[in-house]
Image: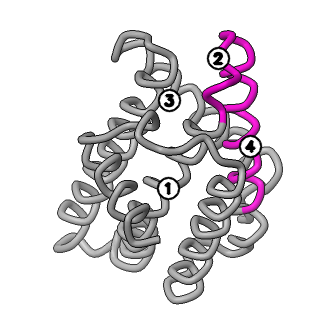
Amino acid sequence: MQDFVRLFTQIALLRRGPQDLPASLLLLVLTLAGYLGVNALVSALLPPVGGWPLQLLVDTLFTLAWYVALLQLVGRPERILQTSTAVFGFQAVLSPPLIASEWLMRRFGEQTTWQLPIALAGLLLVVWLVAANGHVVKAALEWSGTASIMIVIAQIFSGQLLLFALFPARP
């Protein structure tokens, strides 16, 4: 399993891609479990928002459905396992700093001393997430970097719209 964690870290660092993973349903299931476990552990320690467990589950299912549908639509169904595994694997690596950043923004975002550094750190993490995800999509679809980044942004935007629709903010 350490080899896969290293590989997911390499994918997050844009040094490897989904093609370096085996096309294995078992690995996808284990990676999904690992992704959910890492998110649950970090979110339990630093709760980002109320009701996060259900939101995590909805977001995970949406992301999986997005990549299954996308790869079916573009005629690359043979890449579903590797691409989905890569997406959830590198996101498991990036989840702890992303959740910590969101928690810090909620906790210290109103304090002028910490507002800018925390916001910049959060922005850098989101840019890194988009770049790594774009790298995976580019390898999976063999499209340009720009088109791949646009697909990733559309996926993130659509997922957020779904979460806002299902879990409206409470006043």
- Given residues 98 and 77, the one toward you in this image is 77
Question: Which one is earlier in the sequence, the residue at label 1 or at label 3?
Answer: 1
> Mark 3 to mark 2: distance in Å?
17 Å
- Give, as a three-letter code, the residue at label 1: Gly
Sequence-earlier tag: 4 or 2: 4
Q: Are marks 1 and 4 in contact (CB under 8 Å)?
A: no
How far apart, in angstroms, are the residues tagged by discs 1 and 4? 16 Å
Alpha carbons under labels 4 and 3: distance apart: 13 Å
Cβ atoms at labels 3 and 2 below 8 Å apart: no
Q: CA distance from mark 1 to mark 2?
A: 20 Å
Image point (69%, 38%), residue name = 161
- Chief SS of the magenta region: helix
Which residue corresponds to mark 4?
A: 62
* The disc label shown at residue 152, or none: 3
Disc marking residue 168: none
Mark 1 surroundings within 10 Å by alpha-carbon count, few (fewer than 14), some (14 through 19), many (20 or more): many
Q: According to the image, label 2 marks what residue?
A: 76
The x, y position of residue 41, in whole percent, is 56, 83
Q: Position of residue 147 (x, y in %)?
A: 43, 12
